[in-house]
């Protein structure tokens, strides 16, 4: 039986995915008529042998403390998906040790490619940037959607910003999922819609510490959290 360690802040649950996970645990325990999953609510990550569910800092600190795992990198845009048909804009990964982030008359969106929740902003001067960054042309986003993927299958699609009446190209999203073969077992795929260019890839996240925006498939939600966490642990454990 797997035990989830669900982060609380001053004794209170503060994340939407934690509420949905609790409901999914109750559903699966009821559906299977046995205790499939257990959970512990805690402000700290001191309890070992659990699946941590909470903020990015909570999960990464748990990995470091109990498994010695450091430096979990963001996925951002994986090399397999760095294609014009998916991006609809100029984008590349730039290591400033090899070349600077060059501004050619237009602002650029720059995001840290080494640190989750690192630097991310639209810039007009890249001379002070040091490290590896995802650098992309700025594109208007009229609507933003989060696709939820489990075992290489689209299992949910939720609007989280902009015009919810602009629906993304699901065929294009499924093409991305098929091509992205070197992927975690569970992840999210954020796409934007530009009224002129259509659906395009924004970025990809491993399935932890990410907003659900109404996604609540209780049949698979606990397994998605489990598999994404185990994916980050070295096989020696």
Image: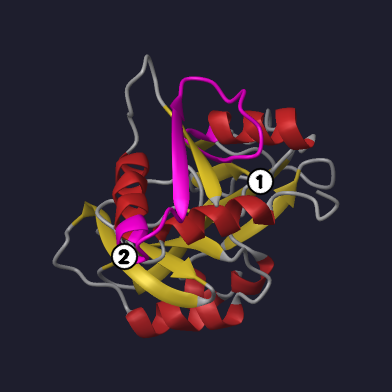
Q: Regarding mark 2 in the picture, which secondary structure is present there?
A: helix
| Type of colouring | secondary structure
Q: Is residue 34 left or right of residue 130?
A: left
Picture layout, residue 168 above or below residue 126: below
Residue lying at 55% horizontally and 83% vertically, measured from the top left: 178
Q: Residue at x 76, y 37 (%)?
A: 67
Residue 193 visible (yes or no): no
The image position of residue 6, as x and y in percent, is 45, 34
Residue 57 placed where, x, y %?
56, 29
Q: Residue at x 31, y 51 (%)?
A: 26
Q: Is residue 36 magenta?
A: yes
Which residue is farthest left?
165
Numbered circles on residues, count? 2
The mark found on residue 60 in the picture is none
Classify 10 Å Cα crowding around label 1: few (below 14), some (14-19), many (20 and above). Answer: many
Q: Nearer the viewer, residue 133 or 107?
A: 133
Instruction: Specify whether 84 is left or right of 169.
Output: right
- CA–CA distance between discs 1 and 2? 41 Å
Residue 198's quadrant in the figure? Answer: bottom left
Q: Which sits earlier in the primary sequence, circle 1 or circle 2? A: 2
Please report the residue visible at 69 percent of the width from the left and 36 percent of the height from the top. Answer: 63
Q: Is residue 34 above or below residue 128?
A: below
Mark 2 neighbour density, 10 Å: few (under 14) some (14–19) many (20 or more): few
- Residue furthest top in the image: 10
Report the residue marked by disc 2: 31
Is 229 colored magenta in this rendering? no
Q: Nearer the viewer, residue 64 or 105?
A: 64
The range drawn in magenta is 28-56
Q: Which residue is mark 1?
A: 113
Q: Which callout, 1 or 2, points to the residue nearer the camera?
A: 2
Quadrant of the image occupied by residue 125: top right
């Amino acid at each position: 039986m797997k035990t989830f360690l669900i982060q609380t802040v001053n004794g209170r649950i503060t994340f939407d995915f934690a509420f949905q996970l609790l409901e999914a645990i109750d559903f699966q325990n009821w559906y299977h008529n046995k205790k499939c999953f257990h959970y512990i609510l805690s402000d700290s990550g001191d309890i070992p042998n659990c699946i941590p569910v909470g903020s990015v800092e909570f999960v990464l600190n748990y990995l470091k403390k109990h498994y010695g795992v450091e430096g979990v990198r963001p996925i951002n845009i994986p090399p397999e998906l760095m294609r014009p048909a998916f991006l609809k804009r100029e984008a590349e990964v730039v290591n400033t040790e090899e070349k600077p982030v060059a501004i050619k008359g237009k602002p650029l969106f720059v995001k840290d490619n080494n640190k989750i929740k690192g630097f991310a902003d639209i810039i007009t001067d890249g001379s002070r940037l040091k490290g590896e960054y995802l650098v992309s042309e700025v594109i208007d986003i009229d609507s933003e959607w989060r696709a939820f993927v489990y075992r290489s299958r689209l299992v949910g699609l939720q609007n989280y910003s902009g015009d919810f009446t602009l629906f993304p190209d699901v065929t294009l999203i499924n093409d991305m999922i098929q091509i992205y073969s070197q992927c975690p077992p569970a992840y999210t795929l954020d796409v934007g819609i530009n009224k002129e260019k259509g659906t395009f890839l924004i970025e990809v996240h491993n399935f932890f510490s990410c907003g659900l925006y109404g996604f609540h498939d209780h049949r698979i939600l606990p397994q998605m959290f489990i598999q994404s966490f185990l994916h980050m642990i070295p096989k020696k454990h």
